[in-house]
């Protein structure tokens, strides 16, 4: 991880922000967090990323985002195929002759020598 020069990053961000929005941003610093125009607080490295986006460096990020969508579509189809199997298991479990919680509790109480307090 490379060290960022705070003054250089802030100067680059202000220049890129002015170029994109036509006005100077209000950057407030609280510790190592920076707030731009009263918005969400971000770290210095996030300001460097925002500078790249504002100055036109967002084009490579968009090309990276397109391939990420294709694998997400494959992942979305795989769980859909798994959901009917899960439903089928649930149906067989309920029709498989299992005990309901009430019946199971009755069996446990019947097998005990003494009953818990409050149960007659």
Image (tube, helix red, strand yellow):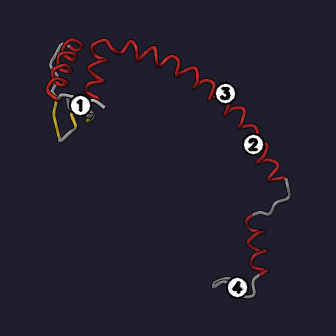
User: Which label's residue is closer to the chain start, 1 or 3?
Assistant: 1
83 lies left or right of 34: right
C-alpha span from label 3 to label 4: 51 Å
Using the image as rendered, state which of residue 42 and residue 93 is in the foreground.
42
C-alpha span from label 1 to label 3: 42 Å
User: Which label's residue is closer to the chain start, 4 or 1?
Assistant: 1
**How far from the left and from the top, in percent, is residue 51?**
26, 20
User: Which label's residue is closer to the chain start, 3 or 2?
Assistant: 3
Mark 3 or 2: the one toward you: 3
Mark 1 or 3: the one toward you: 1
Location of mark 3 (residue)? 77
C-alpha span from label 2 to label 4: 38 Å
C-alpha span from label 3 to label 2: 16 Å
**How far from the left and from the top, in percent, is residue 42?**
27, 34
Q: Quadrant of residue 98?
A: bottom right
Q: Quadrant of the C terminus?
A: bottom right
The answer to whether marks 1 and 3 mark residues whose Cβ atoms lie closer than 8 Å is no
Residue placed at 73% from the left, 65% from the top?
A: 101
Using the image as rendered, state which of residue 8 and residue 61 is in the foreground.
8
**How far from the left and from the top, in percent, is residue 55?**
27, 13
User: Which label's residue is closer to the chain start, 2 or 1?
Assistant: 1
Q: Quadrant of residue 72?
A: top right
Residue placed at 53% from the left, 18% from the top?
A: 67
Mark number displayed over residue 115: 4
Mark 4 or 1: the one toward you: 1
- Callout 3: 10 Å neighbours few (<14), some, many (20+)? few
Mark number displayed over residue 87: 2
Q: Secondary structure at mark 2?
A: helix
Location of mark 1 (residue)? 3
Q: Secondary structure at mark 1?
A: loop
């Amino acid at each position: 991880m490379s060290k960022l020069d705070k003054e250089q990053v802030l100067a680059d961000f202000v220049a890129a922000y002015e170029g994109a929005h036509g006005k100077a941003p209000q950057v407030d610093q609280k510790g190592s967090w920076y707030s731009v125009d009263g918005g969400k607080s971000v770290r210095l490295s996030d300001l460097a990323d925002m500078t790249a986006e504002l100055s036109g460096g967002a084009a490579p990020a968009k090309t990276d985002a397109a391939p990420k969508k294709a694998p997400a579509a494959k992942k979305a189809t795989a769980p859909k195929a798994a959901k009917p199997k899960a439903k089928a298991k649930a149906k067989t479990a309920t029709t498989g002759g299992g005990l309901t919680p009430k019946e199971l509790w009755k069996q446990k109480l019947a097998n005990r020598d003494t009953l818990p307090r409050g149960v007659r």
